Image: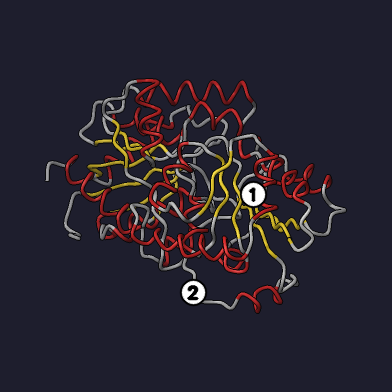
Amino acid sequence: MREKTDKLAYILSDLRRVGPTQQTLNIIRYAGLKKASQVLTLFPEGPDTMLDAYRAAGIPVACLGLSRRRFFAGGAGRLREALRSRGIALAHSCGIIPDILTYAACRGTDCRQVVTLRNFPMEDAPTRMHPLLGKGAAAAHLYVLKRAPNLVACSRSIQIKMQARYGLPNMVSIPNGVDISRFSAGGQDKAALRRQYKLPEKALIFLSTGSFIPRKHIADTLEAFVRAGRQDALFILLGEGGLYPFLREQYRKIPAIRFFGKQADVVPFLRLSDLFLSASESEGLPNAVLEAMACGLPAFLSDIPQHKEILRQCPDGGLLFPLGDVAALAERIRKVDDRALARMREGTRAIYASDFTMEKMAAGYYRYYMERLGR
C-alpha cells in the first residue's frame, strides 16, 4: 500500500497491553501507513505498556500527560494544539475518553475524526467502572457517537446493534483481525510446553483468557467445568480483574483448576491447550476467540451475536451454547471426545481465509482513510 498520504494520528488513553493497543499497532504496520502515522496518548504509561513495541516498529509516540482525574480541564484544547502543530489531517480515536476529547478537539478544524467502536458502550462501561459512573460515561460516549461523522464498528454485529438502537447512519463495520504471523497452530511442541508449565501431558486442557469482570461470566465456565466432572481434564484461566481474587479463592482447593493471572504472551498457553471456553454476554468481536482459533484451538462459545459472527465463517471451528446455561456448557465439556476435537481443530483453519485476518482489517482501514481524505 502507498505510504504517501496526509498525516494520521491515533489517539489512545495509553499503550497498556490490551487488545485495542495491539490492534492499533497492527493497523499501522499492515496498512503500510507507518511513515504517515504517529500516536498521541493522553495519559502517562503504567508498568504494563506496549510503548517499546511501538518504538521498535518505528512509530512516533507522544504523550500529552493529562491528569486521569482532571483530563476534562483543558484536555481538548491541548489535544487540538497537538493535532494542529503536527499537521494532522485524520485523527483516529479509540476508547471513551479519546473519542470524547478528539471529538471536541476536531470541532471547528479541518482535522477529521475516525472513531472505532470496539464494544457496545452501554453494556461495557458499567461493568468496568462503578455502575453509576459507567452509565454516565456510556451516555457521554453515546452523545459523541451520535454526532461523529466517521464511525467504524469492529464487527458487523456491533454495527447492526448500534444502528438498530440508535440509528447512526454513518457507521460501517471493519471486523477485527488476528495477526496470523504471530498466532498460528505451528511452532512450539505441545508436550514440551506442558512440561515447561508443569502441566500433565495427557490431560484434556480447557482454556479461558480475558478480564475477570461480570459480563464475561467466568464463574459460569468454572461451574460448568466442575459439573462436567471429567477426571481427565484441566482448566487454565489467564487474566485479571475485580472478580479474580474471589474466584481464585473459591476454587483454590480444586487441583484441576489453575489460575495463571495475566500473561504478557498468551501464545504458549493457546498452543498447549485443547479447547477454548467463553461464556461472555457482550463483546465487540473478541480477539481472544480469533487468536485461539488461529492457533488451532476449537471454541465453546455463548450464543451471542459476535460469537455467531465468527462461527458463521468458521462453522466447524467450535460449538455454541445458550448464554447463561451452565448445564448446557457442562454437557458440551462432558461429551467432547478426540474425534470431535480433531474435526473442530481442522475447522479452525477456516479462520485464515475469513474476514478476520489482520491483512483484511488493515486493508479495510486503508480504504476507509482514503475515502475520508478524498483520495
Could you tell me which residue is drawn at 54 percent across and 58 percent down?
Answer: 298
Name the residue located 33 percent from the left edge and 35 percent from the top edge: 80
Task: Please rate how many residues cluster around mark 2, counting C-alpha atoms within 10 Å: few if below 14, some from 14 to 19, many from 20.
Answer: few
Of helix, strand and loop, which one carries label 1? helix
The colour scheme used to paint the residues is secondary structure
Q: Which image quadrant for residue 116?
A: top left
Position of residue 187 measured from the top left corner of the image (x, y, whole percent)? 51, 76
Can residue 265 be seen in the rendering of this structure?
A: no
Q: Return the x and y of residue 86 as percentages of the image width and height.
A: 27, 47
The residue to which callout 2 is attached is 186
* Three-letter code, disc 2: Gly
- Few, some or many C-alpha atoms within 10 Å of disc 1 (few <14, some 14-19, many ≥20)? some
Query: Do labels 1 and 2 touch, CB within 8 Å?
Result: no
State the image coordinates of residue 14 (x, y, percent, origin top left): 49, 47
Q: Closer to the camera, 281 or 316?
A: 316
Residue 67 visible in rendering? yes
Counting labels gives 2
- The one nearer the camera, 367 or 200, is 200
Image quadrant holding the N terminus, namely bottom left
Q: What residue type is labelled 1?
A: Arg
| Snapshot quadrant of residue 301 | top right
Q: Residue at x 27, y 57 (%)?
A: 31
Residue at the farthest left position:
375
Q: Where 217 falls versus 237 (above or below)?
A: above
First along the sequence among labels 1 and 2: 2
Separation of marks 1 and 2 at Cα, in angstroms: 26 Å
Quarter of the figure with residue 372: top left
Residue 75 percent across, percent down from the top left = 43, 32
Check disc 1 and report the residue beneath it: 332
Secondary structure, mark 2, is loop
Which mark's residue is nearer the viewer, 1 or 2?
Answer: 1
Asked if residue 375 is positioned above or below residue 182 in the image, the reply reads above
